[in-house]
Amino acid sequence: MFCKKCNAQNDDEKKFCGECGAKLEPAPDPVAVEGQDGAYYCSRHPKVPTLLRCGRCETPICQKCVVFGPAGNRCKACSRHRTPLRPRGVAHEVARGVSDVASSGRGYWIFGFWAMVVRFIASLFGRDF
């Protein structure tokens, strides 16, 4: 059984998700299309018949709902990233990179390079520093 909130796979007998703690609800059984073997109605668009299923959770999906990926066809819920983006963590990595450049002496080279670029551009406009 897959959690609808975080898309984590859980055992069928569990009532709550082991990853996020959300209440687990069983997925509704797909509705088969009469007269077509293996065809079901899309889970998000109940009037659209489809032969396509999600490669992870086996949910019937139509061409509007499919997300093509390296691991095959996925529904939109299964194709989401499970790891949330943490902006504060990204800011820490940027600050660490800036401090590494400043402490290694490369910062002086970078500053010197940009100073030459600015001086060149200023000389194009007739300014002499």
Image: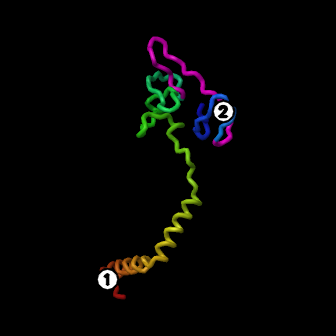
Quadrant of the drawing holding the N terminus: top right
The span picked out in magenta is 19-43
Q: Which residue is mark 2?
A: 24
Amino acid type at mark 1: Ser
Residue 89 position, x and y percent, is 57, 60
Do the residues bearing badges 1 and 2 touch, measured as CB atoms within 8 Å?
Answer: no
Quadrant of the drawing holding the C terminus: bottom left
- Find residue 11 and name its label: none
Is 34 placed left or right of 109 in the picture? Answer: right
Amino acid type at mark 2: Leu
Q: Residue 26: within the magenta?
A: yes
Q: Give the Cα distance between marks 1 and 2.
A: 67 Å
How many C-alpha atoms fall within 10 Å of the one at disc 2: few (<14), some, or many (≥20)? some
The scheme the figure's colours follow is rainbow
Residue at 49 percent across and 68 percent down: it is 97
Q: Which residue is mark 1?
A: 123
Is 62 placed left or right of 7 in the picture? Answer: left
Residue 27, located in which quarter of the rendered image?
top right
Residue at 62 percent across and 32 percent down: it is 11
Q: Is residue 50 placed above or below 6 in the rendered structure?
A: above
Outermost residue on the top side: it is 35
Secondary-structure class at tag 1 = helix
Q: Main secondary structure of the magenta part?
A: loop
- Which is nearer the N-term, disc 1 or disc 2? 2
Residue 94 position, x and y percent, is 51, 65
Residue at 44 percent across and 26 percent down: it is 52
Residue 99 position, x and y percent, is 51, 73
Q: Residue 122: within the magenta?
A: no
Toward the viewer: 82 or 114? Answer: 82
Secondary-structure class at tag 2 = loop
Residue 126 position, x and y percent, is 31, 84
